[in-house]
Amino acid sequence: MVSNQSEVPRSITLRRPDDWHVHLRDGAMLAQVLRYTARQFARAIVMPNLLPPIRTVDTARAYCARILAALGREAGLHGGDEGVFTPLMTCYLTDTTDPEELARGFAEGVFVAVKLYPAHATTNSAFGVTDIRRVQPVLERMAAIGIPLLVHGEVTDAAIDVFDREAVFIEQVLDPLRRRLPELKIVLEHVTTEEAVEYVQSASANLAATITAHHLQINRNALFAGGIRPHLYCLPIAKREKHRQALRRAATSGDRRFFLGTDSAPHMQPAKETACGCAGIFTAPCALELYAEVFEERTALDRFEAFAALNGAAFYGLPANEERVTLRHEPCVVPERIGEGDMAVIPFRAGETLRWRLIPS
Ligand code: NCD
Ligand code: ZN
C-alpha cells in the first residue's frame, strides 16, 4: 500500500477556533469541565438546558457570571479580550417565551441565539416547545431583529424510528417553518444524516449546520461493538456509515454553511453506566484533535480553519479570532476520566491515542 504519510504536515496553525454548541452545565460540573473548552476555544455558544433552563435575560446574565467566575475572571459580558474565553449565551425557547424579553436580551448583548428543543427530545428538554406553531410570533420577532434560532432537529413522536427522527423533523417541521419565515436565521444543530446535509446544501445562506466530532468519527455500529457502549450514546444518535460519510464530506468541503459545534455534553459516570443512561458524549478534552484526525483522513487540513474558526463566526456576524493555535502531528492520549468518584466523566475515546496534539497559544 502506498503511504501518504509524507504529505501530512508536522503541524498546522490556524486561527483560534470557536465551539458553536457546547454544554457547560453548572455548579461542580461546570467547575470541572469548563477548563477543557476554555483551553481549546476562544468563544462557545453555551446551551441553556440547565434545570431549570435559562429563559430570561437575568438568569442568562447570572449564568454567564458563574462561568466567568469559574474561569477565575471578573463577571462581565462578552469580555472579548485576547487569550481569554468568552461564553456566548443562549435563551431556551418555550411555549410562553416573551418576544420582548428576547429582543431586550439580544439588544443588551446577553443573548446571542435562541435554542429550540422540541419538548422531551433530549436531556433536560421537558420545558421545550410542544408545537412550533405556538411560537410563531416569537420567531417572527427573531427574524425581524436577526437573532438566530438553534434547532435540535428531531421529532419526538415515539412511533417514529429513532434513526429517522432527524429526517422526519426536516420534512415535517423545519421545511414548513423555513417556508413560513424564510428570513429567520437557523442553525440545524449536530446534523447526523445525509438528508440534513443535502437539505442545508440546497437551502439559502440563512440556514447553516453544526457538526460534532463524534458524529464524524463513529457510526451506529460503535454503540454495540462487543457490548453496549453507554458513553457513545447521544442525541441525535449516530446513524449508519453512509450518513457519517456525508457528514465528513460536508465538514471538509469548505462550504461556509457547515461549522464546528462539539455538542460536548458531560454526564456523571453513574448516570451513563446504568439501566437507563443519559444521552451525551463528552469530547471537550480533545475536541480539536478529534476533528483534526478527520480532516487529515480526508486530506483536507487546508480547509480545517474554515470549518473550525471562520464559517461559524461569519454566520453569527462576529469577527474571526486574531489569535492562533497550533496542532502538532504527534501522539496525544485522551484522559481515561476527568473528575473523581461519582463526579467522574468518561471522555469520548478515553485512554486512546489520537494523532494530533493541541498546543494552545
Ligand atoms: C445533550 C445534553 O446532555 O445536554 N445530550 C446529547 O445527547 N446531545 C442535549 C442535546 O444537545 O441534545
Ligand atoms: Zn447539545
Image (tube, rainbow, N blue to C red):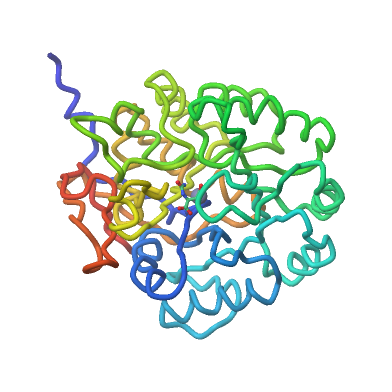
Tell me where residue 95 appears, x and y as whole percent: 76, 53
Q: Residue at x 72, y 55 (%)?
A: 94
Q: Residue at x 77, y 35 (%)?
A: 177
Q: Is residue 72 above or below residue 319?
A: below
- Quarter of the N terminus within the rendering: top left
| 129 and 287: which is toward the camera | 129
| 91 and 331: which is toward the camera | 91
Q: Residue at x 80, y 52 (%)?
A: 142
Tell me where residue 328 appears, x and y as whole percent: 23, 49
Q: Residue at x 80, y 69 (%)?
A: 104
Q: Is residue 137 left or right of residue 261?
A: right
Q: Residue furthest left?
A: 1
| 59 and 159: which is toward the camera | 159
Q: Quadrant of residue 340?
A: bottom left
Q: Quadrant of residue 24?
A: bottom left
Q: Is residue 344 left or right of residue 61?
A: left
Tell me where residue 196 appears, x and y as whole percent: 57, 27
Q: Residue furthest bottom?
A: 74
Q: Residue furthest front?
A: 275
Q: Is residue 11 above or below residue 243?
A: below
Q: Is residue 334 above or below residue 6?
A: below
Q: Is residue 199 left or right of residue 133?
A: left
